[in-house]
Image (cartoon, rainbow, N blue to C red):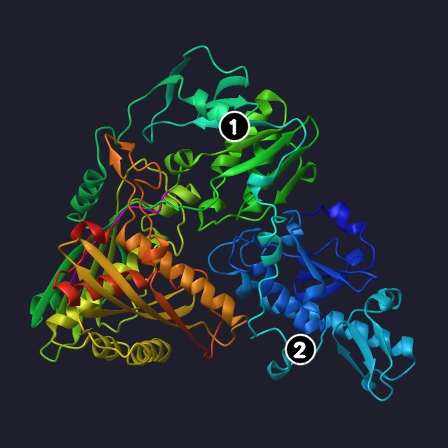
Amino acid sequence: MISRREFLKLSGLTLVIALTPSGYRILHSKDAESFKVNAWINIKENNTATIYINKSEMGQGVYTGLTSILADEMEFPIDRITVKFPQPRKPYLDPKMNSMLTGGSTSIRNMFMPMRKAGAVARELFLEAGARALKVKKEECIAKDGRVIHKPTNQNVTYGELIEITKKLIIPVTVKLKNPEDWKYIGKSVKKLDTEEKVNGKALYGTDIYIEGMVYASVIKPVRWGSKLKYYSVNKPVSTKIIDIFPITSGVAVCGKEIQAVWDTKRKIHTKWSKSKIQGMTHEDMIRVCKKALRKKGAVAKKRGNVEKALKTGHKKIEAEYSLPYLYHATAEPLNCVVNITEKKAQIWIPTQAQTNTLKTVKRLTGLPEENIEIYTTFLGGGFGRKSAVDFVTDAVEIAQKIKRPIKLFYSREDDISSAHFRPIHTAKIEASLDKEGNITAWKHRIASPSLSEFTKKRSYKVDPQVVHGVKDLPYEVPNLLVEYVKVDLPVPLWYWRSVASSHNAFTIESFIDEIAYHAKKDPVEFRLQHLFSNIRASRVIETVAEKANWKKSKNGQAMGIAYYKSFRSHVAQVVEVSVDEEKKDIEVHKVVTVIDLGPITVNPELVKMQIESAVIMGLSSAIYEEVQFEDGKISSTNFDTYRLLRIDKTPKIEVYILNSQGRMGGVGEPGLPPVIPALTNAVFWATGKRIRDLPLIKHI
């Protein structure tokens, strides 16, 4: 958490990774004003370094991953590096996103080469400076562990001791990167750098922030989405610890000296709201609205060949309908932030994935220039996409402006669920035809759901690109393909949820491909490979996962299911092994085997495994239990007693195998989630004979 002014005051050698019109360049900080800067390195006289990264740390290991890359190329001890967040100014924007944003499984992909080049330039500068200091030839020196060593004499000098010489050197435009066989950290399971401070309590999350004079705030939101506040009244007396109660754009704000007093007072406030479009509706009603929309012809997202003719003339036709409910992000740390606004300055301490959008929101609401706004990013207690939204920032700024003192907006769990921007509800109808040899000749896929892109981008779409992603580019080789989208209007707020539409489309596609294989009398593995014959990476992960799981549809009272999906450039195949006790209405997931091909490089195998394990658990939880429930248009699942999650005693054994291949780097944080859902439901079919087409699964056991 550092401002640009503070950065420019840093002692030692400061290097900048700059994105220029001709590509990445490495500059001294004094030369960087006119360039877009992606990360800064500061090396001090005591031979320690600080790096500034534009990605949020929410448990995924970005601190460790990006630091490993730079430290490796720089030949610098990783345990002597500190990681900090910069301010979200233009210099720090992710060049591919044009934003300081963490999402889309892009952190390592987008920053891998910039961080390598920055480290390599630093290494070469210190080699040159070291040779001059030791009065020897540069070719006779090596860089190792933050030192320049003269090989013939073993004389050495630390990087920190070379700073004054290095500052005067001309930074090379091109440098040679290390060969992969010489990597010390890249490709190795470096332990997380932030573990110790999280264990000893020194790590700061949003909920830990306290500033002098701060008061607490919470907001009463509409009981039904789409409603507007008509009036409110307060049942007196209220606690003397309450400072103010007043309306804001999203509802009624309550401010006080203690958060419990604030929450207690909320229950004493009577509100009346305008009528909502979903008044009187349950979650089942909303699914029915979407399924009814499936009867309409949709906007065409993709058309290849003549689907209708192929469906009519096919040897066998199969069709099915699927539905998935609204889902809550369920982060360990509910939404919160601390805001301090004065006449000339705004400060916000926030666990956010979206620093740039936070800055824009504060600027819009306060009218302050960007240079007078400071965004301090804390650790995040989970994000999963939810903390890339800024609705709670708007609430906090409005409240701080009204009461003119620092405030901490702090959601209870009930507030967090009731205010959440959910993963969209989703329904799909799929039709396919087979020839006599069991080959798919046609695939018709119609989706009816609210538009995620319209809600997040605030513009209209004929076909929502997010919703059809993964279907429009169906991996299976089918000569006739038709993909349609029908938009459903419901006022429930939507947002990105881990893996976005892939969690929908992997379930529908991979459930249906399993059904087709059954009707074609083919093994599910064999059938997938039959229709992926030119997709080498997809075929390899499927063949590998079948081998590692010792693939059999059923054995010893247990059953296996398989699924494959490509998302965020990574190919993933998973096998889930289950048993089902229908009398006890219980499902036991015994084992999940995952194979991921994430491209040519694995930066940290252990971080990859952790992320896959996390994704598997979240995917299983969403498939078996999770569903945002509504009664009379109101959310009725308001805490974890009614919004069920997978518990630790239900967590299966998880095996992860990593493959590398040629091509572009793939993501890690999200790709492990989508296919585990259909792999699970396909396993349930082989265990019970029941096809699960509507989630959550627990309703069908």
What secondary structure is found at the residue carrying circle 1? helix
Query: Which residue is the site of mark 1?
Result: 259
Mark 1 → mark 2, Cα distance in angstroms? 53 Å
Image point 72% across, 65% down: which residue?
26
Q: Is residue 36 above or below residue 284?
A: below
Q: Amino acid at mark 1?
A: Ile
| Image x and y of residue 584, in percent | 16, 53
Q: In the picture, which quadrant includes the C terminus?
A: bottom left
Side of 90 relative to 220 (left or right): right
Hey, which residue is sitting farthest right in the picture? 135
Is residue 437 depicted above or below 66 in this figure? Answer: below
- Residue 121 in magenta stretch: no
Query: Residue sitting at 55 percent across and 64 percent down?
Result: 108
Label 2's element?
Answer: loop
Q: Which one is nearer the viewer's eye here, 606 or 494?
A: 606
Q: Which residue is mark 2?
A: 177
Which numbered disc, 1 or 2, marks the residue that appears first in the sequence? 2
Residue 537 at what x, y percent from top left? 37, 77
Where's residue 655, x and y in %?
38, 71
Magenta segment: 422-431
Residue drawn 56% across the image and 51% down it: 99
Amino acid type at image mark 2 = Leu
